[in-house]
Amino acid sequence: MSEYDNNGMTLFLKIWRQKCCSEKGEMVNYTVKNISADVSFLEMLDILNQDLIKKGEEPVVFDHDCREGICGACSLVINGEPHGPEVLTTTCQLHMRKFKDGDTIVIEPFRAKAFPVVRDLMVDRTTLDDVITSGGYISANTGAAPESNAIPVRQENAELSMDAAACIGCGACVAACGNASAMLFVGAKVSHLGLLPQGKLEAQERVHNMVKKMDELGFGNCTNEAECEAVCPKGIKLTNIARLNREFAVSSFFKKNDSGTKQEWS
């Protein structure tokens, strides 16, 4: 007979506990029993928290929202891998069948200067929103939607744009990168807008402003190690970084003024 419970898995958890970004944190050991292989990773943490609350202890804080792999909120590093061992999967889509009875699981928050810890496993990822605010949009007049075929788009560009638009802004690319670079995230946003006719008008200004904001917020530089692509739950390709670099090289020094003449960026 196994030394573990027959009704489910027994797992040994090492979880990062930290009250806030200004205080030191530490790894704390927990044991959960009778965990079904069919529950999700976040449901397993729910079970742990229920046990802690019954004991009068503080539950583990972690972020989540949709639990459908859409919002990207479930930002956990599991055994050293952002979102865990399952490829093309967010933490909320990860099921405990990927683990074995008696496994030790190390759970940490995303670690990056630009992602300060809020509490325990929750980090503040609003810096990604700040990057979007700096230029990740298309300016357009409001009103009735135009005829869908009024602006022709090449099929190849449409498909590449849609692939890049799949980015959910979870920050796994930042957490996996040794430099905490957000280049894959920014590259995806620049690509999915810049490949379409509607986005070309502001393309130079967009890439300049987004890269500038990314640097201001403390994200690192890309060294093409491709960890970001390997852990991206939506399969965003490294080619988006190459496109970002090309666009930035063209637009980094010059912009058009109102008269159409090029001038240096301030």
Image (cartoon, rainbow, N blue to C red):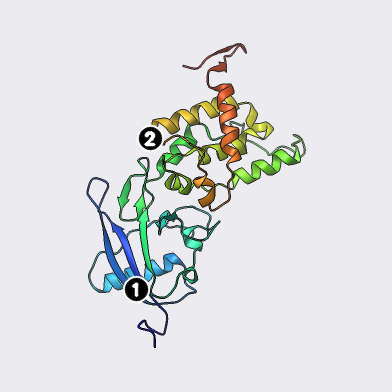
Quadrant containing the N terminus in the rendered view: bottom left
* Rendering coords of residue 186 (x, y %): 52, 37
Q: Which mark is residue 141?
A: none
Tag 1, which secondary structure?
A: strand
Instruction: Compare residues 179 and 52 and report the one nearer the observer.
Output: 179
**x 73%, y 40%: residue:** 156
Residue under pointer 1: 32
In the rendered image of this protein, does residue 180 appear above or below residue 202? below
Instruction: Compare residues 52 and 147 and report the one nearer the observer.
Output: 52
Tag 2, which secondary structure?
A: loop
Q: Is residue 88 left or right of residue 198?
A: left
State the CA–CA distance, disc 1 to disc 2: 37 Å
Q: Which mark is residue 218?
A: 2
Q: Which of the 4 quarters of the picture holds residue 47?
A: bottom left
Which comes before the other along the chain, label 1 or label 2?
1
Farthest residue, direction bottom: 1
**x 58%, y 50%: residue:** 235
Label 1 crowd bin: few (<14), some (14–19), many (20+), radius 10 Å = some
Q: Is residue 152 left or right of residue 263?
A: right
Q: Label 2 sits on what residue type?
A: Gly
